[in-house]
Amino acid sequence: MKIIALDIGDVWTGSAISDQLGIIATPLKTVLTKDLAIFMRQLIDEKKIGEVVVGYPKTMRGTESEQTRKILSQKEFLEKAFPELKWLLWDERLTSQHAQKIQSRYASADKLMSHSVAAALILSGYLDSQRFHNHID
């Protein structure tokens, strides 16, 4: 089973996908947020997806913002559209900034890719925590 991560924004959503073993997170594609459900359907049909990790943009104080509420609303919509998948939120504080720093090193690269890089950072954090959790059980 593969896991995908979404870095949902107002206009663009970055995505990343794990390998079959859940070890490596790879940036996948950046899509228009308004087309996210269509993209998800295609992805589910093409890959063996069982879980979706959604970046949860808390404030630095750990509280919810207007953006947090938008993401929660989008996640709820997607959960209803794709109930066969396991959905969870993952703290994404600072991942977008980190992704932009990584992407800025490659000036000729597609600027939209930073959204998918952010999704890969979210997924990588989640995968790392799962390996650690499974290791101590």
Image (cartoon, rainbow, N blue to C red):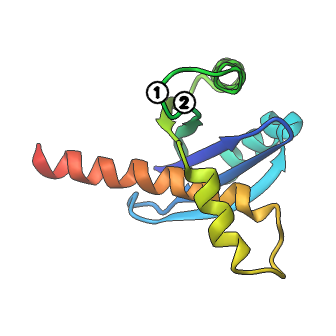
Query: From the viewer's perspective, is 65 left or right of 49?
Result: right
Query: From the viewer's perspective, is 34 left or right of 66?
Result: right
Q: Is residue 16 visible?
A: no
Query: From the viewer's perspective, is 123 left or right of 128?
Result: right
Looking at the rendering, which quadrant does residue 76 occupy? top right
Across and down, in percent, residue 26 comes to 57, 65
Q: Is residue 65 above or below residue 40?
A: above
Query: Which residue is farthest left?
Result: 137
Task: Kindly identify which numbered label has been placed on residue 108.
Answer: none
Depth check: 25 or 59 in front? 59
Across and down, in percent, residue 94 comes to 55, 49
Q: Is residue 103 above or below residue 1?
A: below
**Residue at 54% across / 30% down in the picture?**
58
> Is disc 1 in contact with disc 2, using a CB cutoff of under 8 Å?
yes
Q: SS of the residue at dot 1? A: loop
**Residue at 53% across / 57% down in the picture?**
121
Q: Is residue 19 above or below residue 8?
A: below
**Residue at 72% across / 61% down in the picture?**
114
Depth check: 15 or 3 in front? 15
**On the image, numbered disc 1 is attached to which residue?**
62
Looking at the rendering, which quadrant does residue 116 occupy? bottom right
Say which amino acid is labelled 1: Gly
**On the image, numbered disc 2 is attached to which residue?**
58
Say which amino acid is labelled 2: Lys
**Residue at 79% across / 34% down in the picture?**
37
